[in-house]
Image (spheres, helix red, strand yellow):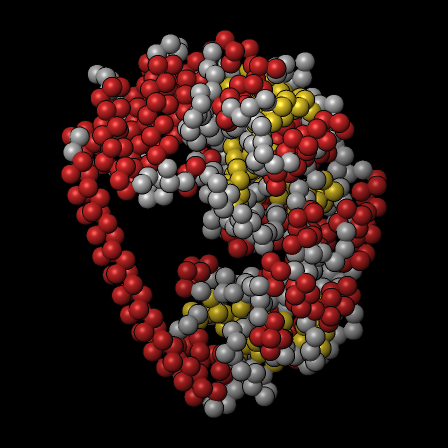
Amino acid sequence: MAKISIVVPIYNVQPYLRECLDSILNQTFRDIEVIAVNDRSPDGCGAIIDEYAARDFRVRPLHLPENVGLGGARNAGLAVATGEYVWFVDSDDSLTDGSLAAVAERLAATTPDVLIVDYARTYWWGAQKRNMLHGLLSDPAQPDVFRIAERPELLRLFPCAWNKVVRREFLLAADLPFPTGWYEDLPFTYPLLAHAERISVLPRICVLYRQRRSGSILGTTSDRHFEVFAQYDLVFARLARAADGARIRPWVLGHALNHCLVVLGNDRRLNPGSRSRFFRESVALRKRHLTADGFVLPADASPARHRILALGSWLGYRSLRYAHGRLDQVRRKLRGAKRKLRKRLSGTRRKLQYAYYSVQRRRPIDQKLAVYSAYWGRGVRCNPGAIYQRARELTPDVRGVWIVKADRVGDVPAGVDYVVENSWRYFKVLARGRWFINNVNFPDFVVKRKGSVHLQTHHGTALKSMGIDEMRYALTARKMNFGKLLKRVDRWDYSLAANTYSTEVWGRVYPSNYQSLEYGYPRNDVLSTATAEDAAKVRAELGIRPDQKVVLYAPTHRDYATGFDLQLDPVALAKALGPDGVVLTRAHYFYDRDTSGVAAHPQVRDVSDHPSIEDLYLATDVLITDYSSVMFDFGVLNRPIVIYAPDWDVYRATRGTYFDLATEGPGPFCRTQDDLVWLFEHDQVRSPEMELARAKFRRRFCHLDDGRAAERVVRHLFLDQPAAV
């Protein structure tokens, strides 16, 4: 008997079936059986199933003689399943790397009747979006095991079968076969939770829920949506015999009525001529199942629509819908008018500012003015920040002014002069400055004046493809105007290189006539000169004890994804470190203000908004990263670095890399969370082999980081004293 039986109902999914099966069979946890149910699929799915079964004994093909629908196919798979637990996985979805091992670990720890797992939606154009209610699964106050009546808010989660792993004997005893028809998950999900005595959750993305461009019932206009009423009748009939059925009934009824109103209000689901009948059926459903206990409305429900449903007034509903429609039209028109007015005013203001910039360019260059910027106006940071601080010491007569965005003014340290982006003074300093120091590029309208000096510091040693090399990758190439890029590069007088490798890369991907300053990275000076006392001070400021083991996880962004996703479960990592372990998570600066919900455990802390990543380095014992340039900076400290690359193949295909992290990286290379956790559980981060790998990595990339990089740049740039390294 396998630990987990995975039932995969299959119908007309040939383009997606291999991805689904591979995502299951290629997991590190292998104590499974995969029951592939061919629901008389008209395409090549049957042959694919047989192919997989022939080469993997864990695949059990089940070819049904006739099409029975999704519910019937699941029932057929359950009837032959032998596992202790059963998981219904849809054949156009897939499991994430390491999810089976994480599920098995959670099952062993909690022995639940039902385990609820998290998921993310994946869209056909490549975007990915995590379940918006994932915070319900990561509440640190919830017990490991509970009944649904103790946490009825979990009924807000998507009522589907594929986000639940169910103990098979419990499921058979509950007698909850899937019905036929659309919305077949409803009579399964709610009664299942009501029957369960032990429910647990796994706040980890285990399922990638595919959003197909076409073919989903949620985007299909059909009278088959009326089947939702019979499904809810079955829900309440089954709740009547469930242990917690009566206790959660008000919540389920609230969700049922709200669900009906959502279908009614969706123009893609019902034919216009069917809406009044659907409304009447919704009223009838309410009357059939409303008891003295009433119902609890979901947080996103419209009280006005529910009041009209209670009155049973179709005219009232139509009037409300019409009023809301008209109000939406008025709002859209007002928003459009405001946008046009703002655009017109902005255009006028911008024309005047460009004219002002042009006038200022006719005035002499301010021979004592240095203009700084970093990360598109995100504050005093990175290499420009380190150069600025050293310049204040070595060349106090040079006046440094920073460009910052309006929403980042609060991040500017006291005593630092700055201009707000797009203010009048902003255009003045861009026109009159002598030195321009940036780790990205100044705007396209900036004209390189004779006598001005532009230094491009960059903001990391390049692992991923950069500059004109991005032309080879469609995902990044479509976002880039390479002609404009090269015009910006032509403004550079100097390009700062962290090492010889970077000199070669920048020279190839940003071809122009600038001079390379192979001086090391100024932002790393603090790492080269830091003492044990400095590290202890930072730890104290962060509230971390000297005896605690600190792991910093700092991933980069993905061009192929939208939004921030950690890619791992930091809580599982924290548990592997033991009670004295601390996991710090830091998002890429693109998402440093959009990381809500990351930290949900006493040993996990989100430090994305910490002003200094260099301070975080000093407090860290081990760095975990993926393709981020933080590995090259942290290497200066000569502390262990672990590469966690769950999407290595996808990343290389969509962005490209200059060397193979698996063979040329600074430490262990992990493709799954299970492997990553194993490293820390078995103390394999500091093996002799990894020490040699890190030493080789440091010789290649960190050889110029001696604590004097900023001084070399300042002397060269402001004092005309080129340095010999």
Q: Residue at x 43, y 88 (%)?
A: 359
Q: Residue at x 74, y 58 (%)?
A: 658
477 sits left or right of 590 in the view: right
Of 239 and 535, nearer the camera is: 239
Which quadrant of the figure contains the N terminus? Answer: top right
Q: Residue at x 38, y 80 (%)?
A: 351
Residue 396 is situated, as x and y percent measured from the top left of the image, at 56, 75
Of 571 and 246, nearer the camera is: 246
Q: Is the residue 309 above or below the residue 481 in the image?
A: above
What is the total number of numbered labels drawn onto the structure image? 0
603 sits left or right of 324 in the view: right
Q: Is the residue 628 above or below the residue 71 in the image?
A: below
Q: Is the residue 654 above or below the residue 388 in the image?
A: above
Residue 678 is situated, as x and y percent measured from the top left of the image, at 71, 31
User: Which quadrant would residue 715 be assigned to in this image?
Assistant: bottom right
44 sits left or right of 201 in the view: right
Residue 30 is situated, as x and y percent measured from the top left of the image, at 70, 25
Of 411 and 459, nearer the camera is: 459
User: Which quadrant would residue 707 be assigned to in this image?
Assistant: bottom right
Q: Is residue 590 visible?
A: yes
Residue 686 is situated, as x and y percent measured from the top left of the image, at 77, 38
Which quadrant of the figure contains the C terminus? Answer: bottom right
User: Which quadrant would residue 720 be assigned to in this image?
Assistant: bottom right
Q: Is residue 702 visible?
A: no
Of 584 and 295, nearer the camera is: 295
